[in-house]
Structure formats: structure tokens, C-alpha cells
Amino acid sequence: MLHAHLPFVRHPEYESFLEENWLFEAISETYLPLLRVFQKLKNEGVQFRLTMSFSPTLACMLSDELLQRRYIGYLERHVELAEKEVARTKDDPDFSPLARMYRDLYAENLKDFSDTYRRNILWGYRALEKEGYLDIITTAATHGFLPLFIQYPRDIEAQIQTAIISHGRIFGERPTGFWLPECGYAPGIEDFLKKNNLRYTFCAAHAILFSEDQSPYGVYAPLTSPNGVSFFARDIPASQAVWSGEDGYPGDPVYRDFYRDIGYDLPLEYVSPYIEQGNIRVNTGFKYYAITGKTEKKRPYSIEAAKKKVEEHTDNFIYNRMKQVCRVSKLIDRPPIIVTPFDAELFGHWWFEGPLWIESLIRKICADPDGLQMVTPRDYLDVFPTNPVGRPSFSSWGNNGYSNVWLDGANDWVYRHLHKAIERMEELVERFPDEKGLKGRALNQAAREVLLSQASDWEFIIKTGTSSQFAIQTVKEHLSSFNIIYENLCRNTVNTEWLTNIEKRHNIFPDIDYRVFRSQQSRK
Amino acid sequence: MNRDQLQTLSFEELKELAMEEGVALIRPLDKDTLIEQLIELYSEDEDEAENNPAMIIKEKTFDLTKADQNTSAEMNQVWELPERYNETKVMLLLRDPNWAFAYWDIKDADIELYRDNPLFKGLFLRAYRFSDSSSKQHAEYFDIPVKLQDMSWYINLPEQGMNYFVELRVRFQSEERVLCTSNTISSPLERIHEGMDQDAFRNSGNDYLLLSGLYGFGDSSSLVQDSKKIISLLDNQYPNAGA
């Protein structure tokens, strides 16, 4: 299971905007390389099965013309830098092949993005779903950490319904599964999933381990809530092997080092055209060193050595999963399912060799009919529709296993405002139950701003300190925009020019209907 | 917060911060000890962040520069939110099985009324707990004094597996009044339930842990009673599992 998500960052009012690079880096290093891996496997006749979730915020950004255009510019700058790097390193036997590798990578990205997928890579993923290789599911509309909104059922309903509508518009299918943002579960969330015909979701291991209803299968089969929604719990040993930076595969000394980047290593005048505002050093993606170890003296990265290590690591992963299956199979009366969900951005962005590892893993698993079998939760439920019944326990996959990351001394102040915005949105829906025209547009934008303010990423970033001022300003911007609409509507006015401007900037969910915040009672 | 920032706080502010963070206050209390305890706590938090792989990956996704330069935050417009909304309300959020976060607001007019009233003795939160089988009316409670200017508090939940709600109350010389009541939250049990029945499921406690993916670190039987260790293992996802 690969979960692809980035928060909505789109600033047409600026010529360029640093945080839009989150998207551009992820397309270059993760989404396009993964797509190529899947296409390659498909072309070789490998019948693989994988679940992917695309968050509605990410899917909207990938479908956005402005961001697509800006990404082309980003790629063209990288191709230009790559050419300069090939020339600069031509006499260096260690770095020259690497510079050529980056040149090929960015040129391939440009070709695939512009020509193969005509700027929308989701077409590639959508085709793979239609051909039976992928199950694509959704998550909360703006990736809100749902347990901290459980007091506001209409909001959770809005997050889920908006996601499903957005998913249908972009992928042409109704999703059957749902990724709980941050694996955040609180009792009652299954009711919203059920209401929206979502059959399954994913949770942390201790959601099942600490459940009042023990499953005889532990995490090796889903726990189905009394209303019929199945919870697939993350397997710890399988996750650990890949996730852990130090002890997992990505931390191997042979692999490419994430931190050494020419954006910092080369003279400012050389990298100036390719960094932020010409003078703020940032990652460029051109990295020439291997992790090596805990030393400043890094060895040059060797592509061949890394490829060899990838094969070792896939063998090791399969070997350990087989051992795990043998150990667990003695205790249960059906084949265990090992659920391995990852943030997609791990593969390629931080762990450069990640896509190669996935390719090798899929190929090896699919080549051995007596070994592991790739299944999606949907496949599993088709074979085993009846599972132990119970309710998971409150949990997440964050530090300490609960809400601690998203409710912390640094970010707890946001909830007063986020909750107030929901209450006001609900009030607006009651006061204006059936508006169209300008007022309807204002109400729809209000709904967008409420949802956008709730992305779990903002609390995470505020807590961890990375770009915290940007996260704070973004939350405040969405909430302030909402408040402006609320106050205008209370005065029975709409500022058309301002509204048009904000609609253009925060253009997510073009088909949103503000009545998604209406109570069930009012709908009847 | 770092040492320099903590040094700027008064003794009373540090004490409040320590209580909010759940630091066990060692007596005799002095400013330096409080600062040391808080620094230790914050470094533990950092360690947790460093150990949780899911969080590490997430951090890397947002790493664009080495330092937190906030280059794009210098936007054309700086957005500010109202500090509060001039309403009387209290909300309770569950942080983990042992801690909840309460935030509240009191109407300006009421605050002025209390401030000017010579009989006003203070505000406090009354935290109630009750089990699923008992009613709210028979809930046990404990009080947490707060100041007029306070707007939020972390509340230590004394017992897992219970339901909690709070009332924001005002105390006058000879009476108390409820200003508002929060929503109810349910704290989960952070352990394997005692109801786990070996006969029913054929599996021993060790087997159940194995079925939860917790194996490969010696005697697992102690884990059945040691939820903190389980959480820590889940967090760190024990290092040798993949090898």
C-alpha cells in the first residue's frame, strides 16, 4: 500500500514559490519513477497488485494547469543544470556517470511528463487501475487528522464526501477503500466510512492489539467493525525493514546520501540560477555521495553498488516475510496477510533507490508461485469476506501512537480556530440552505477554506519546525479567508472581486457544494 | 523551547509549564531544576520524533532547505486570527490515553463582571470521570484552578478506559456557578485487554503478541503487562526486525 499525499500549495500570485517544490520534487523523484516501474513491469507481463491512495489535495494539484506549467519550468531548469553538471564533471570518473544519470533522469521526466502523460501523470495511474494492476483509493479531502474533529460529525462527513466526489471526478471511479490520514482512528469513524460505502481502511497495529475485541488472527487478518468496515493493520516487522532510516534498508551505507547536495556544496555563483531567489541554498536533487556512515567524509555514490544492494535487500525482505508467514501460520487457520503501508514519497525522494527496490520486490514475488502473493485489501475481502468482528482502539501511526504529534504545545492553538470555523460553516449552511449565484460561490469557497485549513501537515510542520512559519501562515490564511466570507455573508454582502481572486488562488474541489456541511437531519 | 527561552520565564511560568507538560515536580522546587526537567522532557520528545520512521519520512518530504529559512513565509500579506471569539465555551480533546487538552473562552462581559466583583474567588475546571456502566450524574471529579487569563490546559487523566468531561466553573465567596460544560471524551485502555482468553482463541499471550507483529526481542510475556514498552516498540519498530 502506497499512500501519496502532499498538502495543497499553489500560489499563482507569486512568480515562483519555494514550497511548490514539495510537489515538483515528489513528481520528479517519486511519482514519475514509480509510474515507470509499474509500466515496465506491466510491459514485461508481471501481474502485480498494489493499492495506492492519492489524497484529493495531491490529485487536484497534479491536475492543475498552473502547477503543471510550473513543473515544466522546474524540469527545464534541472535539465539545464544537468547539462552543466555533465560538462563540469566530465573528467571526474566518480561523478561523471552520476551527472549523466541525473541528466537522463530529468530528460526522461520531461519527456514522460510532457509527451507520454501530456502533463497529467494521473492518467498513467488511472490506466494501470483500469488494467487491473492498481487499486486506487482516497483519503480525507484535505488530509485532516480525523480524531481531533470527531466532535464535528458534519465536518468528517464533509471531508469524506468531498474526497469521494473529487476522486470520482479525477479517476472516474468510486473508491472502495479509504486511507485514514496518519492512520488516525477514533471510535465512530467507521460509521462515516460505512455511510459512504467504503469497505475497508488501514490502521496502526495497536488499534487491533489494544482493541477490546481480540482477533484470533491479530494483525494478520482485518478486524471488521460491527457495521462491516474492515480495518487492515500495519505490520510492524515488514514496515520496520523499509521505514527505519538507520536500521532499515534506506540507511545502508551504499545508498545515496540525501543530505549532500550541490545546492550546498558548490559555489553560490554556480548554483545561483537554480536555487531560491538566487541566493538561498536549497536542495537541487543533484547528490553525488553515498551515505557511507556517520562521517563527514562521504564516498562517491556508485550506481552499480546500489543496484546490487537493492537485490540483496529485496531477497532479505522476502526471506523475512516468508519466515514470518511460517511462524504466524502455525497459529491461524488461513494465510496471513502482511499489510505494508508506506508514504509513497519515501520511495525515490528520501530513499533514492526505493523505486528500484519496489520493482525488484514485485518482480521476485510475482516470479515465485509458491512464495508470497501480492494482494490488495479488496482482493483479500473477495476471498475472505468474513472476518473477526470488533472495534479498533483509538490510535495513529504518529509518535507515541495517538494524537501527540497533531496536538502539542506548539500547535494546539489551531484547534480553537479550526473548530470555530466548522461551527460557523454549519451556521452558514443553516442560514443559507439553498443559495446559488454569487452567494452560492461565496459559500462554496467558505467550505473550501474550512477544509483546507484542516490538513494534518500544518500541525505536523508547526510541531517539527520545518517551514513552521509557512505552515502557520497557511492555516491563518485559510481561516482568515473563511472569516472574511463569513462576516460578509452575515452582513448580506459579497465582495465579488475579492471572491473571484480567492477562487482563482484556492481553486481546489471545483465541484464542491457547501451543503456537504449540512446535517443529515436538514438533508431529509 | 531551548534553555535560553526557558531562562526568560519566571519561576511561576516555569512551574505552570512543567505542570502543563506533566513533569513530576521534585521538591524543593527551584528555577534551575525546573529548567533542567523541562529540557530533559523536550529532548525526550525530540528523540521520539527521531525514532518514529513514519514521522521522519514526513519531515524529509518537507525538507527543502537545511535550515528553517521560511523563505516563502514572507508573503505579501500577513494573516492574523482573533485571539478568541468572545463566547463562553469549553472543548475537550483527547491527546492520548493519559492526557487531554481543554481550551475555553469566556464572554468579555462576564470576565469584566468577575474581575470587578469583590466576591469573585477564581475560576476552575472540574474534570469528571465515569465508566461506561455508570452515569454522568454519578461521575467522580477533581478540580484544577485556572486564572482568568488562561485559555487552555493539559489535563492528566487519572484512569484509562474511562469517560471524561469538564465544566468551567466560577467560584464566589459563598457559591459556585457552572459557566459551560465540555463534550465527553473516552480514554482508551493502553494495554492488551484482560478479557483476552487463551482458551477462546487458543493463543497464549506470547502468541497474541506474535500475531500483532511483536516478536524477536526475547521474552515477550512481560509485554502483556507493559503497554509503554509495546508503544515504544511500535514507535521504534524494533531495529532488527528486518534483518
Image: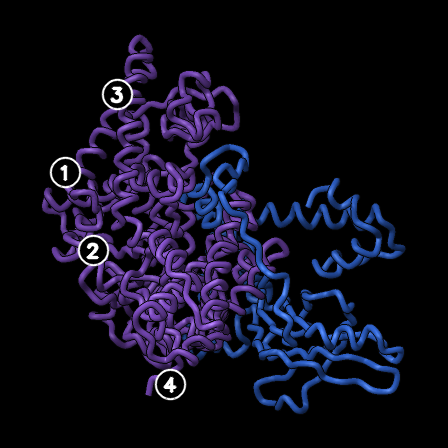
Chain colours: A purple, B blue
Q: Amino acid at mark 4?
A: Ser
Circle 3/circle 1 CB separation < 8 Å: no
Q: Are marks 4 and 1 on the same chain?
A: yes
Q: Spatial distance from mark 2 to mark 3, Cα to Cα?
A: 32 Å
Q: Residue at x 62, y 78 (%)?
A: B182
Q: Which residue is mark 4?
A: A522
Q: Nearer the viewer, residue A365 or A416?
A: A416
Q: Spatial distance from mark 3 to mark 1, Cα to Cα?
A: 22 Å
Q: Which residue is mark 3?
A: A100
Within 10 Å of the Cα at label 2, are there few (<14), some (14-19), or many (20+) other Cα atoms?
A: many
* Residue mark closest to the camera, 2 vs 4: 4
Q: Which residue is mark 1?
A: A115
* Residue mark closest to the camera, 2 vs 3: 3
Left or right of A431 on screen, residue A28: left
Left or right of A192 on screen, residue A362: left
Q: Amino acid at mark 3?
A: Arg
Image: B130 above or below A419? below
Q: Are marks 3 and 1 on the same chain?
A: yes
Asked whether the viewer can see residue B219, the reply is: no
Q: Spatial distance from mark 4 to mark 3, Cα to Cα?
A: 62 Å
Circle 2/circle 4 CB separation < 8 Å: no
Position of residue A504 measured from the top left corner of the image (x, y, whole percent): 33, 53
- Secondary structure of the residue carrying tag 3 is helix
- Secondary structure of the residue carrying tag 1 is helix
Image: A229 above or below B28? below
Count of numbered badges drawn on the protein: 4
Position of residue A379 measured from the top left corner of the image (x, y, whole percent): 21, 65
Circle 4/circle 1 CB separation < 8 Å: no
